[in-house]
Image (cartoon, rainbow, N blue to C red):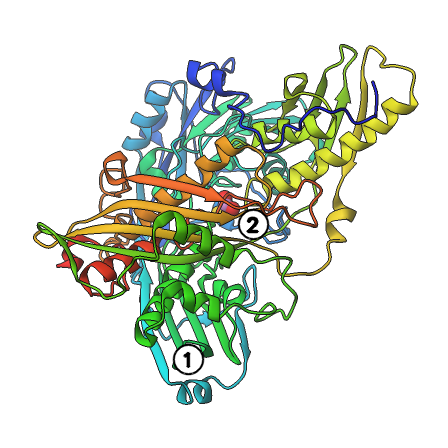
Amino acid sequence: MTTVPTAREGSVGTAHTRVEGREKVTGAARYAGEVRFADLAHGWFVLSTVARGRVRSVETAGVLAMPGVLTVLHHGNAPRVDTGYIGFLGVPPDPSCAVFQHDRVPHLGWPVALVVAGTSEQAREAAEALVVRYEEEPHDTVFTGERPDAYDVDGHVPAVTGKGDLEAGLTASAVVVDAEYSTPEEHHHPMEPHAATARRDGGRLEVVDSNQGAAWVAGDLARLFSLDPASVRVRSEHVGGGFGSKGIRAHQVAAVMASTVLGRPVRVVMTRRQMFSLAGHRSPTAQRIRLGADADGRLRALEHRSVSATSTVYEFVEPSASVARAMYDAAAHHTANRVVRLDVPTPTWMRAPGEAPGSFALESAFDELAEKCGVDPIELRARNEPERGPVSGLPFSDRGLLACFREGARRFGWADRDPRPGLRREGRWLLGTGTAAASFPVMARPSTAAVTAEADGTFTVRISAADIGTGARTALTLVAADALETGPDRVRVRIGDSDFGPAMIAGGSMGTRSWAWAITAAAAGLRERLAAGTGVPPQGITVRSDTSAAVDALPPKERHSYGAQFAEVAVDTGTGEVRVRRMLGVFAPGRIVNPLTARNQFVGGMVWGISMALHEEAVRDAASGGHYGADLAGYHVATHADVPDVEAHWIDDPDPDDPVGIKGIGEIGIVGAAAAVANAVWHATGVRHRDLPIRPDRVL
Ligand code: MOS
């Protein structure tokens, strides 16, 4: 082994297919619901049929006599758990995961029992036969932005920020935009439903699960069940999507309870329909934006207020107004995220929480301001580039927004655009183009990794990372190869195992950056050891890293990824149908580790933006408190026929404070995408759409 840098080209930045791709397409990759266990029993959730009240009785006798039924867990007999702790991510757990602890029903679809049987069919049949009686109470699930009971709450970010005199700024402005925007309740629905199998083995608890952080779920299970953290192991090697929904949830807790009670492995899988109330969702938002500007479009006043909904059991805030805190400055600058409590399931992170709905409102309002000022929308952004963080006052680490717009405008052909709306017709179609800006915070969290030099000259990396379909495992293989100055074919990256130690989750667009940092640090230590030593013993040489100190030492700056989104739409004047004809995004996303999978991330986000703009909407029925059409027939998402030519590009933009130059690409692709589509619909028709989705009945 040598530490002299070789002339070989690095692997970071070159296209690699997924290291586990063959396993996935041949079916050899086992997902959490398919890993084989001897003596496996199956649990099936029974969910409440009332939206508020108490469970009066769970009538188990008949069901316990049904074929294969082993037990029925409910609030009267389930093991107790402890939710009084601060979790892995620095917040208390949502008590929704702590099933069967009391008789209260806080929303429709709340787990009231788990029927466990020898096969999943037996469990399902018995679950459907189980009689649960309720004391029903009146419920309230109707969300509007005008609710007087909305209140400020500091979620992941402060609720309210403010500087300058807003009303004076607006009064002094030559041009004012004052508009209200709304986005509906939206759901994640990863392809692979949530699934967990728990096994108690002596003093050990082993859980095979589908999640975004094995160490996160293991840590929370240890606390919930008051177990020694070292005795809990969670594995989650292959994950078929997550998007924020795959943390600690009811299914893991129920599986652990049942396996504890029965003394055998128990699997709990959510059905697609159950996911509508058990997996978390994005809250609806009602947003108001007021912009005041001089005639040339320079902002004097900016206000962004957002109201979202949470459950009665936990405060979760969709921080939509926070996007304005990074994007645009004004002498008077005010933002507020408020929340209202309803008898609904607790919402959770869903891809670009805050930024996705917030950018729809803010970037739509900017388009309205451009129209009113008669300034090109891109030029308007250029005139409002902030010098420092509008709220933090911190310097920007770098700000690639205008570079994205320049490159996007060139590729999209923006220069020839006639800004006037409603002019371009092609048969029954009206045509238009639109653009919007995107940003997403760049952060890192402490992680640990172990890198082993094996006796055969290969390397093994162990890190409790999660690849939720992003290609993270492949990216980490490339990062490790470069850090070890070897080829990716000599590096094996093992992930998804809490026994590998604490690591950041796949979330907040921070996963790959945080994990790569830890791997780079361990690899550097290993290379020093190898340079100093006399050879590799049969058991190999392992070096561990912990990036806590390095991550904490990051100098405070405004760090963000940026993007410019462009869309061209055709609007059918007869039916009101909006078809996206092309979509183009240019991103300043930090160093790209693997262009092949990075492109997937951007295109996936943009397609989700099309879906958000035109299709997605979970409609709640006020009478029952549940959804109409809680399935993927009723909940519309963009399908192949809805998705045109989508192009994603990026500019070279390495982060100066990251060892690999990574920023994070998981979420920036959806930010601004819906606004670009909505702005294009205005350009086509001359009508502003401030409520998503832009359904045909709203267009007509
Ligand atoms: Mo995400 S909402 O960081 O999985």
Horizontally, residue 211 falls left or right of residue 134, namely: right
State the quadrant of the C terminus.
bottom left
Q: Quadrant of residue 536?
A: top right
Spot occupied by residue 195 in the image (x, y as percentages of width and height): 45, 30
Q: For the residue carrying disc 1, how many other residues have a C-alpha within 10 Å: few (<14), some (14-19), or many (20+)? A: many
Residue drawn at (75%, 46%) of the image: 548
Number of residue marks:
2
| Viewer-closest of 587 and 216 | 587
User: How far separated are the C-alphas under marks 1 and 2?
Assistant: 43 Å
Quickly name the residue at label 2.
Answer: 93
| Viewer-closest of 499 and 312 | 499
Spot occupied by residue 168 in the image (x, y as percentages of width and height): 45, 89
Q: Nearer the viewer, mark 1 or mark 2?
A: 1
Spot occupied by residue 44 in the image (x, y as percentages of width and height): 38, 30
Q: Quadrant of residue 681?
A: bottom left
| Viewer-closest of 85 and 288 | 288
The earlier-in-sequence mark between 1 and 2 is 2
Q: Does the closest atom of ligand 1 sit within 8 Å of the Cβ of label 1? A: no
Res. 293 mark: 1
Residue drawn at (17%, 62%) of the image: 422
Amino acid type at image mark 2: Pro
Q: Secondary structure at mark 2?
A: loop
Q: Is residue 461 visible?
A: yes
Amino acid type at image mark 1: Ala
State the quadrant of the N terminus.
top right
Q: Secondary structure at mark 1?
A: strand
Q: Quadrant of residue 287?
A: bottom left
